[in-house]
């Protein structure tokens, strides 16, 4: 038994009575009300989910297990000589809420190495997909293809399924998936964009180090990977990828089905695909300028042209945040340190100066500030990863950490199958007093 699994068991056993008590003794206490706008417009702000893994304050941004991003990065153990923590230690932290010691983090590193090998049938599947397939479709298909290996599904079929133990099988599936997905992502990249010249895993390296190795990108890309996966991991339960994963898992579907579905939600341009859209948009700006650096006036015109043509400015705005996303800030600090003179970074920085005022002037977006996706593609581009169709896959590797931690806890606490209630438009009109019953 691993230290992580033992610790998780202790945490789960300590936590269960809190959930049971809330449900039994306080189940009827109201946490809020729902308006017609919320019922029609994407349930924005409806408080109807529970997670202890992260919390998103509209002004402060994300906290993982109570810690801000800088606190998280500072607290967790790091590989020797590196600036960013082991992703494996971060997984320990998200699951348990405890900062692991170096030895505990390294135990997870070793556990992931043991489970790293990716099945040949996944490579065969990916090779057989049409060459026009988007990397996100390949990624999602690869995950669901491995469903036949699900320990959770086997346990459910065993005939002695017990709700109290179900989390253990979800945890095993989650660990197997996390150990493999950086390799799957790198395979997709090398297969699709590097003439299928695949680099096999290096079993001496941690998750971030091995990912950089399998991508074929030298240091400090290993640290970029660690930073990137941690920053993109979790953003509460209500965002589309996390919520989709949670919803699917609530049916007692296993982690493979659930994560694959969550990744499909991430693939939308209003969500994770925005990072590729930012790059595409910026390159369009550069192309129009014919290589000449735009002035702020030029940039303002491009922004207005985009808005006037009915499109959103990718990388800006957020459903919950009302300030600059601290995930954007973290990446900006990385850029200021490692690529301060990069041309694309300067463009992004110029956008930071011009877009918020324009969005305020336009008067539609509730949050004019940049989100995580505004900055992330620039870093990848700088390190030679220029196939921006791939960027959302990177987001997906990170997001898997958060959503898999969440569905492990969902099973531990026995959260019910999700089933909100719908109303008809006529019923809303009656509630509004427009129509009489
Ligand atoms: N550019 C132009 N218009 C924007 C905008 C932007 N960046 N952000 C919001 N708006 C518009 C909305 O489209 C909406 O217009 P309509 O009333 O015509 O439909 C209006 O402002 C109000 O929207 P909102 O309440 O401020 O934002 P939502 O909660 O509805 O949507 C989000 C949030 C992120 C989808 C939206 O801000 C957006 O489309 N941003 C650009 C895409 C993006 O960067 N997505 C990535 C978000 C982070 C992530 O999940 O990865």
Image: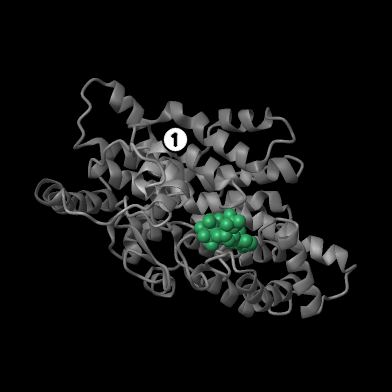
The residue tagged 1 is 256
In depth, the one of 55 and 361 nearer the eye is 361
Describe residue 208's horizontal placement relative to residue 192 as left or right.
Answer: left
**Badge 1: how crowded within 10 Å, few (<14), some, or many (20+)?**
many
Is residue 225 visible in the rendered image? The answer is: no
In depth, the one of 342 and 285 nearer the eye is 285
**Residue 212: x percent and y percent?**
60, 56
| Residue at image point 29% right, 57% down | 52
Q: How is the protein colored in the picture?
A: one colour
Residue found at the very far right of the displayed protein: 290
Describe residue 397's horizontal placement relative to residue 302 as left or right.
Answer: left
Quadrant of the drawing holding the C terminus: top left
Q: Quadrant of residue 99?
A: bottom left
**Residue 180: x percent and y percent?**
49, 43
Q: Is residue 276 above or below residue 255?
A: below
Quadrant position of ligand 1: bottom right
| Residue at image point 26% right, 53% down | 3
Q: Quadrant of residue 220?
A: bottom right
| Residue at image point 72% right, 39% down | 196
| Residue at image point 50% right, 54% down | 398
Q: Is residue 317 above or below residue 240?
A: below
**Residue 267: x percent and y percent?**
59, 45
Is residue 341 visible in the rendered image? The answer is: yes
Q: Quadrant of residue 248?
A: top left
Asked if disc 1 is less than 8 Å from ligand 1, the answer is: no
């Amino acid at each position: 038994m691993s230290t992580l699994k033992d610790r998780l068991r202790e945490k789960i056993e300590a936590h269960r009575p809190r959930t049971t008590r809330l449900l039994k003794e306080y189940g009827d206490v109201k946490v809020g009300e729902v308006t017609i706008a919320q019922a029609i417009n994407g349930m924005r702000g409806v408080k109807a989910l529970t997670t202890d893994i992260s919390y998103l304050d509209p002004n402060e941004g994300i906290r993982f297990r109570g810690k801000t991003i800088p606190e998280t990065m500072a607290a967790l153990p790091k590989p020797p000589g590196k600036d960013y923590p082991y992703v494996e230690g971060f997984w320990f932290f998200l699951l348990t809420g405890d900062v692991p010691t170096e030895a505990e983090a390294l135990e997870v590193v070793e556990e992931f190495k043991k489970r790293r090998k990716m099945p040949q049938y996944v490579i065969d599947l990916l090779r057989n997909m049409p060459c026009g397939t988007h990397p996100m479709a390949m990624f999602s298909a690869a995950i669901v293809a491995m469903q036949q290996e699900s320990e959770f599904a086997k346990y459910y079929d065993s005939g002695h399924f017990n709700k109290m133990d179900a989390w253990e099988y979800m945890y095993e599936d989650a660990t197997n998936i996390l150990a493999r997905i950086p390799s799957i992502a790198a395979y997709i990249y090398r297969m699709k964009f590097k003439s299928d010249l695949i680099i096999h895993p290096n079993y001496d390296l941690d998750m971030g180090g091995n990912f950089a190795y399998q991508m074929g990108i030298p240091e400090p890309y290993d640290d970029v990977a660690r930073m990137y996966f941690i920053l993109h991991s979790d953003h509460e339960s209500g965002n589309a990828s996390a919520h989709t994963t949670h919803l699917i898992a609530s049916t007692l579907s296993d982690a493979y089905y659930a994560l694959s579905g969550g990744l499909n939600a991430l693939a939308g341009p209003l969500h994770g695909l925005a990072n590729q859209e930012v790059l595409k948009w910026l390159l369009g700006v550069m192309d129009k300028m014919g290589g000449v650096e735009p002035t702020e006036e030029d940039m303002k015109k491009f922004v207005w042209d985009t808005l006037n043509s009915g499109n959103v400015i990718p990388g800006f705005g957020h459903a919950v945040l009302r300030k600059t996303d601290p995930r954007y800030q973290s990446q900006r600090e990385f850029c200021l340190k490692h690529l301060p003179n990069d041309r694309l970074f300067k463009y992004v920085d110029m956008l930071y100066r011009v877009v918020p005022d324009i969005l305020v002037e336009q008067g539609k977006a509730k949050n004019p500030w940049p989100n995580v996706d505004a900055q992330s593609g620039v870093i990848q581009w700088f390190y030679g990863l220029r196939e921006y169709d791939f960027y959302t896959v990177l987001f997906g590797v990170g997001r898997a950490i958060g959503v898999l931690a969440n569905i492990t806890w969902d099973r531990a606490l026995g959260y019910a199958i999700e089933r909100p209630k719908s109303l008809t438009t006529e019923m809303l009109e009656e509630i509004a007093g427009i129509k009489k019953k």
